[in-house]
Image (tube, rainbow, N blue to C red):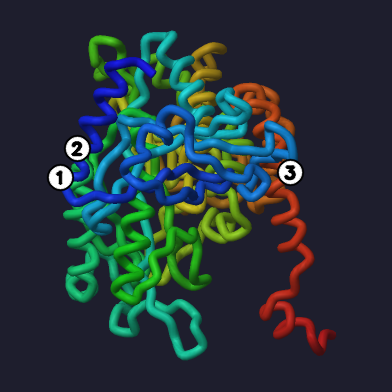
């Protein structure tokens, strides 16, 4: 290990010890994007960075590793730049890890996949900046242990309701101050369209940092909510009769001088040729992207058009784009794209890897997007979609997985082995759902006909 790195590790240990830190959480994510890891005494920080923290590979979702031999061990190698104390867990710090197997970078590690796609962008001289908007619910439980919103937070149109915000102000404030202490620039928190639903906004960063930060946001929110006897959830559609939660991605490219690459103020939609190529890439691959961006059965309870109890719905269902149009899957703003397909049940590293891959394909092939749509397509009839040749996003997980299987470009960019393992993990989930029998079916068919 180089002297400079050893000194940086020792300096980090000294600084953390002065803050009362005694334990480091060596954290990585599984194929679903769920945070995993173990506790490491601060004195052994060097081991995590040099050799990695060891885990039994087959015990981790989606590694596909064997139960014996050198490749049975998964090591999480710590990235020193991510090491920081956790204000909501005094005495503990987190370090983000990337996968090593048999001494080599692991192709099944989604964080490494993202780093590889970032390298492809860098070869073009571009940096992807990402702003992430997490929507989430804070829920209590009823007498049967089922999650429910606060009964007092049950307005017909609860958007921006200050009374509801006030009831959970301490929880939200702890999130804001804790994340701010970890380098997040939190700039607003509001009540969303459903009872018990909130959104916390923080400023953008480069793609890798954005992904690392989002995992930290989830860890913080879950811990703080649980201490307040609440359930934090990013489930896309926890209630059939209420709006769902998305995870909108704000995407912008800059060159080596920090200038916006996708912006053209003279264009009617504010986009340069590169910006339009990126739109085309995202639209072209949207069916397959859905497998990563909307990765659960429940995701597709959100991706339908219809009115919510609050009188609005912002979930996309059709593959189209327009200027400042929140009814399309891609919303263009000057020099920036908002991709609205994603939800919080996703693996953020796989999400951003696939996003970059789609954008790069658009750039490489100089794809032109279809004509922009600058009207409310929620009001359209079927004939309107046919006339404009606007296709529908996958309407269930099974359709999305088939689209991913058929997208050779995305599979190559993500890695054929990773995609194969992902499909092997998600297909049984879809089959299990299809074979399950719901309460709805009992009510409708038990005495049918």
Query: Which residue is rendered at x = 73% and y = 83% of the image?
Result: 442
Structural distance between the alpha carbons of marks 2 and 1: 6 Å
**Split into 4 quadrants, where in the image is the C terminus?**
bottom right
Secondary structure, mark 3, is loop
Q: Nearer the viewer, mark 1 or mark 3?
A: 1
Q: What's the distance in space between the residues labelled 3 and 2, CA to CA?
A: 38 Å
* SS state under label 2: helix
User: CB under 8 Å between callouts 2 and 1?
Assistant: yes
Q: Position of residue 428 (x, y in %)?
A: 75, 54
Residue 263 visible in image: no
At x 55%, y 30%, the residue is 100
Dot in front, 3 or 2: 2
Of marks 3 and 2, which one's residue comes earlier in the chain? Answer: 2
Q: What residue is pinned by disc 3? A: 67
Q: Is residue 364 above or below residue 164?
A: above
Quarter containing the N terminus? top left
Does 318 sit left or right of 155 as displayed?
A: right
Q: Position of residue 206 (x, y in %)?
A: 32, 28
Horizontal arrangement in the rendering, residue 163 relative to residue 238 (left or right): left
Mark 1 — residue?
18
* Label 2 environment density (alpha carbons within 10 Å; few <14, some 14–19, many ≥20): some
In-front residue for pair 194/57: 57
* Mark 3 burial class by Cα count in 10 Å: few <14, some 14-19, many 20+: few
**Would you place residue 36 above or below residue 321 in this image?**
below
Q: Position of residue 343 (x, y in %)?
A: 47, 50
Q: Quadrant of the rendered structure where residue 84 is? A: top left
Residue 28 seen in the current view: yes
Which residue is tagged 2?
Answer: 14
The residue closer to the viewer here, 285 or 271, is: 285
**Which disc is residue 226 wearing?**
none
Tell which circle, 1 or 3, labels the residue nearer the N-terminal end: 1
């Amino acid at each position: 290990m180089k002297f400079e790195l050893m000194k940086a590790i020792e300096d980090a240990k000294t600084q953390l010890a002065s803050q009362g830190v005694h334990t480091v959480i060596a954290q990585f994510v599984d194929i679903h994007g769920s945070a995993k890891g173990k506790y490491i005494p601060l004195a052994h920080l060097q081991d995590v960075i040099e050799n990695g923290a060891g885990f039994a590979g087959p015990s981790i979702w989606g590694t596909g590793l064997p139960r014996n031999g050198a490749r049975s061990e998964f090591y999480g190698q710590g990235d020193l730049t991510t090491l920081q104390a956790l204000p909501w867990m005094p005495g503990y710090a987190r370090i983000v890890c990337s996968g090593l197997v048999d001494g080599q970078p692991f192709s099944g590690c989604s964080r490494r996949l993202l780093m590889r796609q970032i390298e492809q962008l860098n070869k073009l001289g571009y940096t992807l900046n990402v702003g992430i908007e997490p929507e989430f619910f804070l829920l209590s439980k009823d007498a049967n242990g089922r999650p429910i919103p606060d009964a007092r937070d049950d307005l017909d149109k609860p958007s921006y309701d200050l009374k509801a915000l006030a009831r959970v102000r301490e929880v939200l404030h702890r999130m804001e101050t804790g994340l701010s202490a970890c380098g997040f620039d939190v700039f607003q928190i509001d009540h969303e369209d459903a009872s018990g639903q909130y959104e916390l906004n923080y400023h953008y960063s480069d793609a890798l940092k954005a992904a690392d930060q989002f995992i930290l946001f989830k860890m913080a929110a879950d811990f703080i909510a649980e201490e307040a006897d609440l359930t934090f959830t990013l489930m896309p559609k926890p209630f059939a009769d209420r709006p769902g939660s998305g995870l909108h991605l704000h995407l912008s490219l800059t060159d080596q001088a920090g200038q916006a690459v996708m912006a053209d103020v003279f264009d009617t939609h504010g986009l340069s040729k590169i910006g339009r190529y990126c739109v085309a890439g995202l639209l072209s691959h949207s069916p397959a992207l859905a497998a990563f961006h909307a990765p659960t059965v429940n995701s597709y309870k959100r991706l339908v058009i219809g009115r919510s109890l609050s009188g609005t719905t912002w979930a996309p269902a059709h593959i189209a784009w327009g200027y400042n149009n929140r009814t399309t899957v891609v919303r263009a703003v000057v020099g920036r794209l908002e991709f609205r397909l994603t939800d919080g049940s996703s693996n953020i590293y796989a999400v951003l890897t696939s996003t970059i891959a789609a954008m790069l394909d658009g750039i490489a092939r100089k794809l032109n997007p279809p004509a922009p749509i600058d009207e409310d397509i929620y009001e359209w009839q079927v004939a309107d979609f046919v006339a404009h040749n606007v296709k529908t996003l996958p309407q269930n997980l099974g359709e999305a997985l088939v689209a991913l299987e058929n997208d050779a470009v995305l599979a190559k960019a993500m890695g054929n082995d990773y995609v194969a393992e992902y499909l092997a993990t998600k297909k049984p989930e879809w089959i299990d759902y299809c074979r399950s029998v719901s309460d709805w079916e009992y009510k409708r068919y038990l005495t049918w006909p």
